[in-house]
């Protein structure tokens, strides 16, 4: 599980491996290299697959801790 405190920010980075991200609680915002922003919210499953290039940035928004389960693909 991954936990992120409110206001946590990760600058540009890549996913270290292909994985599903299952959000348990809290909200986050991901920004892609094209400038697109996506809300990452509970009850949704996301696929992290940006293993090359500039990647994405990540920010926990709101006042609740962001908690997610990572399910890695076999390598």
Image (tube, helix red, strand yellow):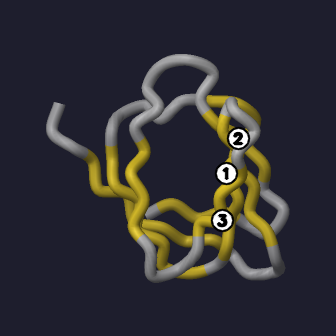
Q: How far apart are marks 2 and 3 (CA)?
A: 12 Å
Tell me: residue 20, above or below residue 51.
Answer: below
> Secondary structure under badge 2?
strand
Asked if residue 7 lies left or right of residue 49, the reply is right
Dot 3 falls on a residue whose secondary structure is strand
Q: Identify the element where label 1 is drawn.
A: strand
Q: Which residue is drawn at the image coordinates 69% and 33% (left, top)?
A: 34
Mark 1 and mark 2 in contact? Answer it, CB < 8 Å: yes
Q: Which of marks 1 and 3 is nearer the N terminus?
A: 1
The earlier-in-sequence mark between 1 and 2 is 1
In the rendered image, which residue does mark 1 sit on? Answer: 30
Left or right, 75 with respect to 38, comes to left
Say which of 5 and 37 sits in front.
37
Please tell me whether mark 2 or mark 3 is closer to you in this view: 3
Task: Give the residue displayed 74% in from the left and 81% down from the top.
Answer: 64
Compared across the picture, whether 1 is left or right of 7 comes to left
Residue at mark 1 to residue at mark 2: CA–CA distance: 6 Å
Q: Tag on residue 39?
A: 3
Residue on which the image places disc 2: 57
Position of 53 relative to 71 (above/below): above
Along the polypeptide, which appears first: circle 2 or circle 3? Answer: 3
């Amino acid at each position: 599980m991954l936990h992120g405190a409110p206001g946590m920010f990760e600058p540009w980075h890549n996913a270290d491996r292909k994985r599903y991200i299952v959000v348990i609680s809290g909200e986050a915002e991901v920004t892609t290299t094209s400038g697109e922003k996506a809300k990452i919210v509970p009850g949704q499953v996301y696929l992290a697959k940006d293993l090359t290039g500039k990647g994405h940035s990540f920010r926990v928004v709101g006042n609740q801790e962001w908690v997610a389960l990572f399910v890695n693909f076999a390598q």
